[in-house]
Amino acid sequence: MGQLKTENDYRNLAAERGFEWIATTLPKDTKTPTKWECLLRRHPTVHSWKTMKSNGNCRQCHWDKKRESIQFDRRTKEGKAAYARYWSSLPGNSERVSVQRRAKHAEFRAENPLPPTRTVEEIAAQKSAWNKADRETYPEKYQAKSKREYEADKENIGARHAKRYAENQEEIRAIAKTVRDANPEIHRAAAKKYRQENPAKGAARRAKWRAKLKQRTPEWVDLEAIEFFFEYCPEGCDVDHIAPLQGEIISGLHVVENIQWLPALANKAKGNYWNCDELAMADYMRRLIRDYWQM
């Protein structure tokens, strides 16, 4: 404990420091805070004997002098900010500022409540919707980005695509067929654009088809019957080879018994696929041809 002091000691110290000791009871030691009052402007303050002895100043007088020595031009933004910093630094004002800020924040939150907490799945769905809308709004940007990424890592991307197609061949074909059936105009426009941009590939494919057709055409073929099939093909249909000329399981001949009329979309979807059940359709076509030539 600190050394005990008398009332006269407190009064003498107060006069020495420019204060008046106004407490009614004597502190129990020199570390216990007691009440003082400055003689200049009669500001009350609380200090212990040791604090008053070492650095006993009136904090309110200190801030009043500081305010009087600073000129704030409150018409400017900088002046308002400087005055606000000065005012909040005054004794007791920082607590009032905190209370005012908390009340203002609570009022703002009452008028603008936070959105409810979302799950990870909801956030992912929202981001996916944003990305989709952005892709639809700026398709050229995403096409250019995909092209740059592909050109930068062409070999690895091609290998990944080939592996994925080999592992999910049936599923990918089914999805592609669904997309083509749902958007025939877009599919035809894309195919036409590809042919225009890659004429060499189209010429090579047609040359290969002509060579294959020549190889699969026997000498005894009835060309007139085949011409009849092409001439009277219904609108919106194609002449299709029942057993494809370049099939994986079987390769058919370019003869009248092996051709039929199919809707254009069905013919494109069929591709090189061959099913034994389609022989019934071939029999029907043969009967049509026979009846025609007997007329």
Image (cartoon, rainbow, N blue to C red):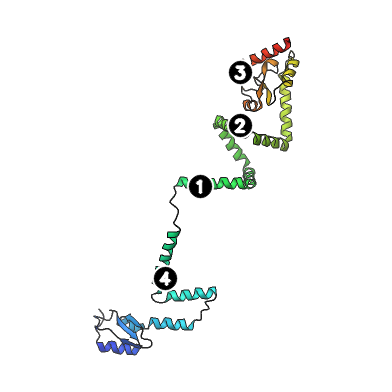
Residue with the mark numbered 4: 97
Q: Residues within 10 Å of mark 3 (few under 14, many from 20)?
A: few
Q: Earlier along the polypeptide chain: callout 3 or callout 4?
A: 4
C-beta proximity under 8 Å, tags 2 and 3: no
Residue 197 spot, x, y in % from top left: 72, 38
Picture residue at 57% right of the left edge, 46% below the top: 133
Cα–Cα gap, marks 1 and 3: 48 Å
C-beta proximity under 8 Å, tags 2 and 1: no
Q: Earlier along the polypeptide chain: callout 4 or callout 2?
A: 4
Residue with the mark numbered 3: 278
**Mark linked to residue 181:** 2
Label 2 sits on what residue type?
Answer: Asp
Label 1 sits on what residue type?
Answer: Gln
Cα–Cα gap, marks 3 and 4: 88 Å
Provide the secondary structure element on which disc 4 rests: helix
Mark 2, mark 3: which one is toward the viewer?
Answer: 2
Q: Is residue 120 above or below residue 216?
A: below
C-beta proximity under 8 Å, tags 4 and 1: no
Q: Is residue 116 left or right of residue 20?
A: right
Residue with the mark numbered 1: 126
Q: Earlier along the polypeptide chain: callout 2 or callout 3?
A: 2
Which of the two residues, 178 or 109, is positioned nearer the viewer here? 109
Cα–Cα gap, marks 4 and 2: 68 Å
